[in-house]
Amino acid sequence: MEKLNTLKDEILKCVKCGTCRSVCPTFRVIGRETASARGKLTLIDAYLKGEIGLTEEYQRHIKECTLCGACRDTCPKGVNTVKLYNSARADLIEKLGVPVTASIVFKNLLESGRLMDMALKIATRLQGLIFKDASVESGLLSRFSLPVIGKGRLLPPLARTFFLDLPEVKGLSGPARTKQVKVAFYAGCGINYLMPEVGKASIDILKKAGVDIIVPGSQVCCGMPAFASGDAAIARSMALKNLEVFEAIDCDYIATSCATCGHGLKHMFVDLLSDSPDLKRRVEAFSAKVKDITELLVKVLGFKAEIIEAGVKKTVTYHDPCHLNRAQGIRNEPRELLKGNKNIAFREMSFPCSCCGLGGGLSIANYDLSIEITKRKIEAVRDSGAEIVATACPGCMVQLRDGLHKYGVKARVAHVVELI
Ligand code: SF4
Ligand code: SF4
C-alpha cells in the first residue's frame, strides 16, 4: 500500500471542478464541502503541507465516507480518490495507533479464526439477553443502548451453526474428487457467522452447475474491514493466511458470494502482498482465480437458471453493491441470473448503483449518517414496487434489512443465489 506522502501528484490531478459532488452519497446528506471528494482532497493536501494537524475534525472528515468509489469513477481527471482515502486512513493508524475496540476485534479475534469462532459462539448463546426478536425477517433489536451499535438498530442474529461448521460443508474440505472444473469456495465472515443459508444456496447452485467444490475450513476473514479502518498490517496478515490456505488447494477457481470479499481477494491482496517479486507472483496467480459467484456462473460456466414451472411471479429488484459494480465491473451477471428465473418479474429500481450506506466502516463510525444514506435506497425499493430486493453482498443485505425496517417499507432481502 502506498504511503500518503507519496501520493501528492494524485492530489495535484484534481482541478476542483466539483463533478464528484453530484454522485457522493455523504455530500448528498451532509451538504458540506468536506463531505465531498474535492473537500477531502483539499484537507489531505493541507495536512501534507503541514497547514493542519491530525485534528479530530480532520479524522472525522476522512471517515465520513463509504469508500463507494462513485467519485473516482466519475472524476474527469481520473483522480484515484479511494486510494488516497485508504492511504489517509492508514496514515491515521500509523500516527495515532489502532483504536482499542478495533484492535481487540481485528488483532485478537479476526487474525485468529479459532478465537473469533470461540468468541462468537459464546455471543450466539448470549444474544437473546441483549437483543429481542424484531419480528421481522432475520432481525434482532438491541434492548438497550449499546456501544457502537446504539439502540433500535436491526441486526442479523448470529447463526446457530456457522457455515464452516455445517457437517455438509465440512465434508467438502478434502481434495477434489473428479476431473471436472474444481472450485474452492471462500465464505467470508458475513456468510460464515451470520448467513450460512447464503453459503448453502451458493454450494447448491455450484453443484447444479456441475463443478467439484472444495471449502477449506482454515480460511479466515479477508481483511477488508481492517483495511478500510486503516489497519493495513492486520489486513496483510489475513491476506497472507488466506493465500497460503488456498495455494494448498488444487482448484481452477476461487468463488465467493460476497462482493466485498471478492474485491478484497482480487485487488486488496495484490495491493498488500506485492512487496517481493516472489510474493507478487504468488498473489497474482491467486487473484486471477477469484470470481464472484455470479461472474463464475454466467461467464465461465454458462449456467442458465433452472427453468422452473411458471407459477406465481415474485417482483424482484436488484441493488448493485459498490464492491461488485464499481470495484469489479459486474453489473449484468446478477441481473441475467435473476431474469432467467421464470417466476421472477424483474423491476429495475432508480439509482440501483447508489451506495446502501454501509461501506467504509461508516455504519460503525457514524451510524446516523450511514442509515440516512440508506433512506434514498429504501425509497427507490419502495417506488419499484418489488416484493424482494436481491443483492450480492451480505453486508448490503444487513444494511438493506435495517433500512427497510427503519423506514417501514415491506420488502424481503435475498441474495441472488437464493432466488435462482
Ligand atoms: S471530480 Fe475529480 S477533478 Fe473534479 S473536483 Fe472531484 S476529484 Fe477533483
Ligand atoms: S468514495 Fe463515495 S462517499 Fe466517499 S467521497 Fe467518494 S463518492 Fe463520497
Image: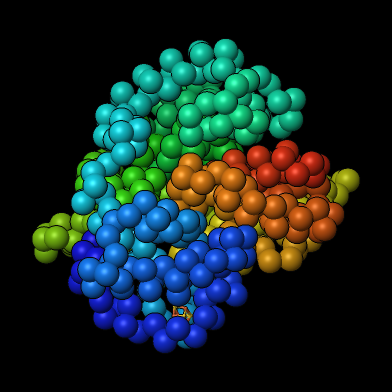
- Where residue 172 appears, as percent x and y from the top left, is 41, 32
Relative to residue 410, is residue 378 depicted above or below? Answer: below
The quarter holding residue 384 reads bottom right
Residue appearing at x 70%, y 57% in the figure: 376
What residue sits 62% from the left and 55% below the top?
Answer: 373
Question: In the image, is 385 to the left or to the right of 362?
Answer: right
x and y percentages locating residue 20 in the rendered image: 52, 76
Q: Please name whichever residue, 353 or 174, is drawn nearer the observer in this view of the structure.
A: 353
Q: Residue at point 15% right, 57% down?
A: 279
Which residue sits furthest front?
A: 51
Q: Above or below — where is 172 with respect to 239? A: above
Q: Position of residue 105 (x, y in %)?
A: 34, 32
Of residues 42 and 231, the one drawn nearer to the viewer in this rendering: 42
The image quarter in which residue 271 lies: bottom left
How many numbered marks appear? 0
Could you tell me which quadrant the N terminus lies in? Answer: bottom left
Residue 279 visible (yes or no): yes
Question: Seen in the image, is 418 located left or right of residue 183?
Answer: right
Specify whether 252 is left or right of 380: left
Q: Is residue 302 visible?
A: no
Q: Residue furthest right?
A: 312
- Colour scheme of this structure image? rainbow
100 or 359: nearer the eye? 100
Which residue is found at the position 68% from the left and 21% from the top?
133
Residue 179 is situated, as x and y percent measured from the top left of the image, at 37, 48
